[in-house]
Image (cartoon, coloured by chain):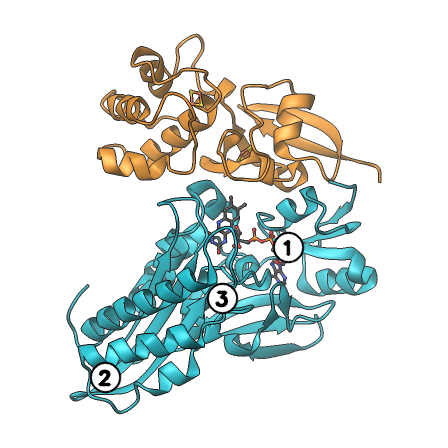
Amino acid sequence: MRDFIIHEPDNIGGACSLLLEFGTQARIIAGGTDLLVDLKQHNIEISHLVSLAKIGGLKSITTIGDEIRIGALVSLNEVAESLTVKKRLRALCKAAASMASKQIRNQGTIGGNIASAVPSADLPPALLAAGAHVIITSGESERKVPMSNFFYGPRKTVLAVGEILTQVVIPSIGKKTAIIYKKFKLRGANALAVASVATRITVAGNLIKEGRIVLGAVAPVPMIAELASEMLAGQIPSHNLFFRVAEAAAAEAKPISDIRGSREYRKELIQVLTKQSLDEAFKRATGGGD
Amino acid sequence: MGDRSIKLIVNGYSYNVSVPAETTLLEVLREELQLTGTKFGCDTGECGACTVLIDGRPFRSCMTLAVEVEGKRITTIEGLANGGELHPVQKKFVELQAIQCGFCSPGMILTAVAFLGENPKPTRQEVRRAISGNICRCTGYQKIVEAVIAASKINGGGRK
Ligand SMILES: Cc1cc2nc3c(=O)[nH]c(=O)nc-3n(C[C@H](O)[C@H](O)[C@H](O)COP(=O)(O)OP(=O)(O)OC[C@H]3O[C@@H](n4cnc5c(N)ncnc54)[C@H](O)[C@@H]3O)c2cc1C
Ligand code: FES
Ligand code: FES
């Protein structure tokens, strides 16, 4: 790693001013599990790190009514094990538990997983399916950005210089609704997603009221498969419907070929994972399953 | 860009070191404190050879900047034995030959110790999951799992 200065401000305002002062020469460090790899491999060369570790208020999971607020510095293991999250959005706990290793999960944060904007990141799909938003602060003002508008491209987000992601807000999920996250990886542990799908279904009577299908690792950003999602609204649930929706999701995916899998293979995976997640989500939304 | 003075608490002892900000905890342990039991493997968070306990929980020391753990309680493999008496997990690794070259052992043992602290009576499947972030390239995992299970049956298998 090239040499840098590390700043450890104890309040958000201080962190934002440091980020503004040093501009492109500065980076935020949370758990460091993404950043240190980039620094060691010289993918990023900067001379200032702004650590969030000493800032209070970013490390807790709280609820306001049915809404859950997760501080940016909450670790992946804390997300995986949180009873509050488990009760309302179990898919997020499962996604967090599927990541990396125990050691990395103790260190990596939810904020870092979102802000690093890696296409295969595990938490964004479930968060998008849940309709979550993030709170971003510049020190002076705060803004609220839906997760669906947060990403621009691989490692590109709406975060401007001097801004910090402080909270992830998950709205009330509502009754008769289930969200399921499915990830395909090459090993049981320490493996990134080759493809992933988060599916949300709300049922009303005998019909599906609405659905949303989010795809991970198969496009420059985690993407909502809009056409496939629309096919669910107002329909009678059936094996055939879910099969066609899964085919549509695979058609919408825009994967690349890389070391973990080819473009064609990823499209196949999306079809299989979408079908599986629809089946499970439907079962859960109607009160069956776990 | 100038060194930073930091105070680290390792295995109950307090050390003052002066290192550049980009120094990892792994580098400080091995090169400043000469605690070479913690191994330098992949240096990118993948293998687990550099695992140490920070406030009792396992972390990758290669992915941790030393300045970020100032004041926290760090345990390395050198800090597990109690006087001359090996920790039960260490004893069982030796007895059941869960060590060949030994490169993965410090990280594996510390991971197991932290795990037994959380789950003192694990099943084999739970042990497998617990050590899944630590790669062993020669013993194979069977004997390691057996050693952790055997340690869990000794009173104090969870002591750190
Ligand atoms: C061995 C290994 C395995 C991994 N496996 C997985 C996996 O299975 N799935 C997966 O999704 N990821 C995986 N990762 C990636 C990484 O661990 C996670 O993405 C983690 O959540 C990143 O969080 P962090 O706090 O460590 O981020 P950092 O490294 O601290 O930061 C990452 C980026 O986000 C920025 N940032 C961090 N926090 C904020 C904030 N609050 N506001 C604005 N910007 C911020 C930083 O400036 C940096 O650019 C793995 C990494 C390693 C090393
Ligand atoms: S040396 Fe740290 S995980 Fe491999
Ligand atoms: S004993 Fe050699 S790597 Fe595990």
Q: Kindly report the distance in space between the C-alpha atoms of the residues bearing marks 2 and 1.
A: 42 Å
The location of residue A252, given as percent across then percent down, is 44, 77
Q: Earlier in the sequence, mark 2 or mark 1?
A: 1
The location of residue A206, given as percent across then percent down, is 16, 88
Task: Look at the numbered disc 2 and say if its residue's Cβ is closer than 8 Å to ligand 1.
Answer: no
User: Does A269 sit above or below residue B108?
Assistant: below
Mark 3, residues whose alpha carbon is within 10 Å: few (<14), some, or many (≥20)? many
Give residue B108's quadrant in the image. Answer: top left
What residue is disc 2 on?
A203
Q: Which chain is cyan?
A: A
Is A170 positioned to the left or the right of B140 in the image?
Answer: right
Give the quadrant of the C terminus of chain A.
bottom left
The location of residue A287, given as percent across then percent down, is 16, 74
Q: Determine whether label 3 and label 2 are within 8 Å by CB.
A: no
What residue is disc 3 on?
A255
Q: Kindly report the distance in space between the C-alpha atoms of the residues bearing marks 3 and 1.
A: 34 Å
The residue tagged with tag 1: helix, strand or loop? loop
Using the image as rendered, state which of residue A282 and residue B115 is in the foreground: A282
Give the quadrant of the N terminus of chain A.
top right
Mark 1 chain: A
